[in-house]
Every structure is written in structure tokens, then in C-alpha cells.
Amino acid sequence: MNFIIMLIVGGIAGWLASMLMRTNGQQGIILNIVVGIIGGFLGGWLLPMVGLSFGGWIGYLITALIGAVILLAIVNLFRRGSVR
């Protein structure tokens, strides 16, 4: 059950991050889910290093959103040479 919740929250975080980074028209729902889940792992690894920690599914959403935005910024940097 936790895996399904992680997919749903990751998809929402990826969708929100793609809207924030203005890449929503370039990617579909599957890529949004993948970016959100990878962003969750990236945020879960980076945020405790700087002293931030969130709990619960809202915390996972915040962590995944921050990680997905960072991931999309890195992808945009390599694609276009600049972050939007």
C-alpha cells in the first residue's frame, strides 16, 4: 500500500514541479511520475544534509517537489544550457 501512495504522491510532485519549471507540455504523465519519484529520492537524500526534515505524506510531497524541481533544473541545464 505504501508503494501505491508513493506513486500517487510522486506523480503529484512531478506534475507540480513540471508546472513550476514550465516543462509540463513537454512531458506526459509517466514522465511526471518518474520525475516525482526520483525527485523524492533526490530530495530525501539532499535535504537532511542541509538540516531539513519533513514527516508524513505531506512531508514526502514537499521533499519530492523540491527534489523534482532540482532534477528538472539539472535536466534543463544540460538540454538548453540554462535553467528556466
Image: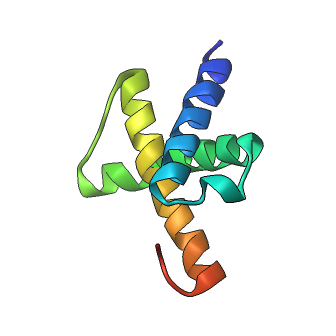
Please, which residue is most extreme toward the bottom here?
81
The residue lying furthest to the left in this view is: 51
Left or right relative to 25: residue 13: left
Residue nearest the observer in this picture, 50 or 76 = 76
**Residue 28 to residue 74: above or below:** above
Tag count in the figure?
A: 0
Q: Quadrant of residue 10?
A: top right
Quarter-of-image position of residue 27: bottom right
Task: State the quadrant of the N terminus.
Answer: top right
- In this picture the colour scheme is rainbow
Residue 42 seen in the current view: no
Q: Residue at x 44, y 32 (%)?
A: 60
Task: Confirm whether residue 7 shows in the render.
Answer: yes
Outermost residue toward the front in this view: 25
Please state if 22 lies on the left or on the right of 54 as rendered.
Answer: right
Residue 80 versus residue 33 in the image, above or below: below
Residue located 60% across and 20% down the image: 5
Residue 13 horizontal/vertical position (percent): 51, 39
Residue located at (61% from left, 83% from top): 80
Residue 36 picture location, percent across and down: 58, 44
Q: Nearer the viewer, residue 42 or 22?
A: 22
Pinpoint residue 6: horizontal percent, then vertical percent: 60, 27
Q: In the image, residue 29 lies at what x, y percent?
A: 72, 40
Quadrant in which residue 79 is drawn: bottom right
Q: In this rendering, would 57 be left or right of 9?
A: left
Vertical placement of residue 48 versus 70, above or below: above
